[in-house]
Image: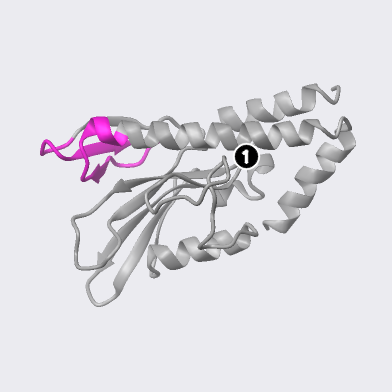
């Protein structure tokens, strides 16, 4: 493989969700989405969906999980920028790495100041299918073998948010691969990915 072919191959793996060990150290930790929930007596919790088909309820609010996730990826939690270098708004897509770009979609009715937005990762080997919900301002999101996820936004709005996140993800990956391509050395490219993988264990 030549130095020019390496970025192209990596882009293909990322876009298809293949070779998940390259994208994320442990495929079992590859995230599909985070859904905020409220457990009676337990307060705010988060339902975590993973690429390998698992669902796990974590008794932590989604803000805490995102903060820890950002720190693990070497990011400053409150200063995540867009792919073009701007400070992102609260509900704008956020990229944590080549394996993880979240779109914000409303997953529950507002309860005081509780978080209502779920986070849906577009860098996964599945396609999101959006169908009509029980009410005009609701939808169902179908992904993998999971049960449909009810969200509180109209289908056209949900599709727009997912497309917006995918565009942000593509811009991020395109810029990352352009920087890698500047090295003109396949060994350097390999070392960069190994170093990133080890840092995110």
Q: Residues within 10 Å of mark 1 (few under 14, many from 20)?
A: many
Q: Residue at the location (84% across, 44% down)?
A: 191
**Disc 1, SS:** helix
Look at the image and say whether residue 121 sits in the magenta stretch.
no
For the residue pair 101 and 144, the one nearer the viewer reads as 101
Q: Residue at the location (18% across, 40% down)?
A: 138
Q: Is residue 195 visible?
A: yes
Displayed quadrant of residue 159: top left
User: Quadrant where the N terminus lies?
Assistant: top right
Residue tagged by mark 1? 20
- Range of residues picked out in magenta: 133-158
Residue 27 appears at what percent x and percent y? 59, 46
Left or right: 137, with 186 as reference point: left
Q: Residue at the location (23% across, 44% down)?
A: 150
Q: Residue at the location (56% across, 59% down)?
A: 70
**What is the total number of numbered labels drawn onto the structure image?**
1
Look at the image and say whether residue 141 sits in the magenta stretch.
yes
Residue 76 appears at what percent x and percent y? 58, 62
Which residue is at the far front? Answer: 86
Displayed quadrant of residue 192: top right
Residue 154 appears at what percent x and percent y? 20, 36
Q: Is residue 18 visible?
A: no
Left or right: 59, with 26 as reference point: left
Residue 151 appears at what percent x and percent y? 24, 44
User: Quadrant where the C terminus lies?
Assistant: bottom right
Left or right: 88, with 7 as reference point: left
């Amino acid at each position: 493989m030549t130095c020019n072919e390496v970025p192209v191959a990596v882009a293909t793996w990322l876009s298809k969700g293949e070779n998940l060990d390259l994208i994320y150290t442990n495929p079992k930790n590859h995230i599909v989405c985070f859904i905020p929930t409220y457990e009676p007596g337990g307060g705010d919790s988060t339902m975590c969906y993973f690429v390998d088909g698992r669902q796990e309820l974590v008794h932590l609010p989604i803000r805490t999980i995102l903060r820890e996730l950002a720190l693990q990826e070497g990011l400053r939690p409150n200063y995540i920028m867009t792919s073009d270098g701007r400070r992102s708004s609260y509900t704008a897509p956020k990229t944590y790495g080549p394996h993880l770009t979240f779109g914000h979609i409303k997953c529950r009715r507002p309860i005081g100041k509780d978080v209502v937005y779920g986070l849906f990762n577009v860098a996964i080997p599945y396609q999101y299918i959006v169908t009509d919900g029980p009410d005009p301002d609701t939808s169902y999101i179908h992904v993998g073998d999971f049960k449909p996820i009810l969200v509180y936004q109209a289908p056209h709005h949900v599709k727009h948010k997912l497309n917006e996140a995918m565009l942000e993800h593509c811009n991020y990956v395109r810029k990352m691969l352009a920087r890698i391509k500047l090295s003109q050395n396949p060994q350097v490219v390999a070392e960069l990915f190994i170093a990133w993988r080890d840092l995110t264990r």
